[in-house]
Image (cartoon, grey):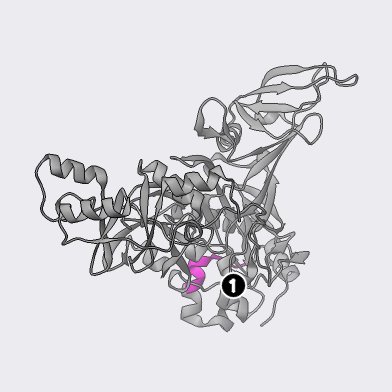
Amino acid sequence: MVKTIAEINQKIASGEVCVVTAEEMSDIVDDVGAEKAAAEVDVVTTGTFGAMCSSGVFFNFGHSETPIKITKLYMNDVEAYSGIAAVDAYLGATQFSEKVGLKYGGAHVIEDLVAGKEVEINAFSYGTDCYPSKELTTTITLDDLNQAIMVNPRNSYQRYDAATNGSKKILHTYMGELLPDYKNVTYSGAGILSPISNDPTYRTIGAGTKIFLGGAQGTIVGEGTQCSTAGGYATLMTTGNLKQMKKEYVNAASFNGYGTSLYLGLGIPIPILDAEMAKATAVRDCDISVGIKDYSIGKRDRPVIRTATYEELKSGSIELYGKTVPTSSLSVFKTARKVAEELKDWIEKGTFTLSAPVAPLPFKQTTKPMKETNKIPLVKDIINGKIETIDASKSVIDAAKQMRKNERNHLPVVSNNKLVGIITSWDISKAVSENHLGTIEACMTQNVVTCGPNDPVDAAAKKMADNHISAMPVIDENRNVVGLITSEHISKLFTRGKKQ
């Protein structure tokens, strides 16, 4: 059984089309098989609703009575890029307010406009013969604009890694708040309803594909930035008319310590052309796996602690290192389901037809890391090869003698060659003054802030500054001490301007 998009559109026009959501399709294929499902079902609708930082809007404001060539533009105190044309600008969702800071940004301005609110405009220029005005202040609503075209460089990730935190402090990230010592896991994406998960070979998803975007009909421009189809991390560049969007699908968000983002509803209809497409859209949460990464590692390639399916993540808890850890979603599955249902309704009513992609996504594309000509050294490049530790069973006097002999102010404390603490000259002074001269376990710091030998030096320096410490043990994946990095190491490095 093979169908074409043109044939499916004829069924839409005649009111005979059979449309189901991706959730429903899984059960249908299980019940009747892929061949029969392909014969019965014409379209499967998908949906997702989550933070899509790479979103923004092009605006045209029209010309003022005294014309102005805008060089700086602020919308509710949020700067929009105006180096395009005299009265055009692009507002990014993550740009934040000059005065309020990370709590209010471009995403909030976009949401305010969709909600029908007035937005204050402050524009500045250097003045020219044809654009003599140098400053302009006004208020606008969405209806006052000539165009408000949403263009999102990177939306709808095919796969999004989950996050956890192996450090000793809370981390504030674009994956939300991550508790120390792997005490929670956060994830994103709709799983079974996720658009690209239902067409993983991109047969029907590409440039020109019509989609649901923010409650309006939108279009896929083509591959998104950072698109890596070869690794299963495809992204989409999308566009749509902001004037037609609905507030329920366009929501601003502020992530504590990170900044603003835009929650956006996005859905893609998948035409069921044959049994292969039917089988692809029968994917379930148990079939979609992502890596859980440790975000305490300040590197581009964070280690994957383990993989997990969406079924496991959506259950509310998962096992990490033998402990049951709570999971939470940054996406809103209830709204993703609503996206898929509304898109289904549009197709059944004949107000939305399908379109074949005019160009496919690049199937074997990979992403490259940033080229860094002044690369910061790694921790292992600046620590010396001499590893000095002390066993936890030793006394305070032993530690004091070892520090004096080797002119050290810090000693990593080990037990069975594994790091269990750190003792400093200050700890020893305090212990002596209080007449505590037994084993060093009683006076050492047990919750040790550490780094790895392959961590960038700037990340290690930030960790030391954040924790108000002047030295930090360097450990491998088995907690074996491989060195000690100190503020003196870092000071010498940056004083002499050493770069790799």
Residue 259 placement, left or right of 74: left
Give the amino acid type for the residue marked by disc 1 in the picture: Val
Q: Quadrant of residue 201?
A: bottom right
- The image shows residue 378, relative to residue 53, as above or below, that is below
Mark 1 = which residue?
41
Q: How many marks?
A: 1
> Is residue 327 rendered magenta in the image?
no
Q: Which residues are magenta?
A: 17-26
Is 180 situated left or right of 8 in this image? left
The residue that appears at 46% across and 53% down in the rendered structure is 331
Describe residue 231's horizontal placement relative to residue 304 as left or right. Answer: right
Residue 373 seen anywhere in this rendered image of the structure: yes
| Label 1: element kind | loop
Examine the rendered structure and indicate whether residue 54 appears above or below residue 62.
below
Residue 352: in sight, yes or no?
Answer: no
Q: Nearer the viewer, residue 185 or 6?
A: 185
Q: Quadrant of the C terminus?
A: bottom right
Q: Nearer the viewer, residue 491 or 273?
A: 491
The residue sitting at 54% across, 42% down in the picture is: 495
Image position, residue 249 (x, y; %): 54, 45
* Residue found farthest to the front: 405
User: Relative to 284, is 57 above or below?
Assistant: above
Q: Quadrant of residue 16?
A: bottom right
Along the line of sight, the residue nearer the viewer: 377 or 297 = 377
Quarter of the image where one finds residue 45 = bottom right
Residue drawn at the location 52% of the way across and 66% of the way down:
22
Find residue 414 and report its horizontal and vertical position in percent: 25, 63
List x then y, in percent, for residue 188. Answer: 47, 56
From the viewer's side, name the closer residue of 118 and 446. 446
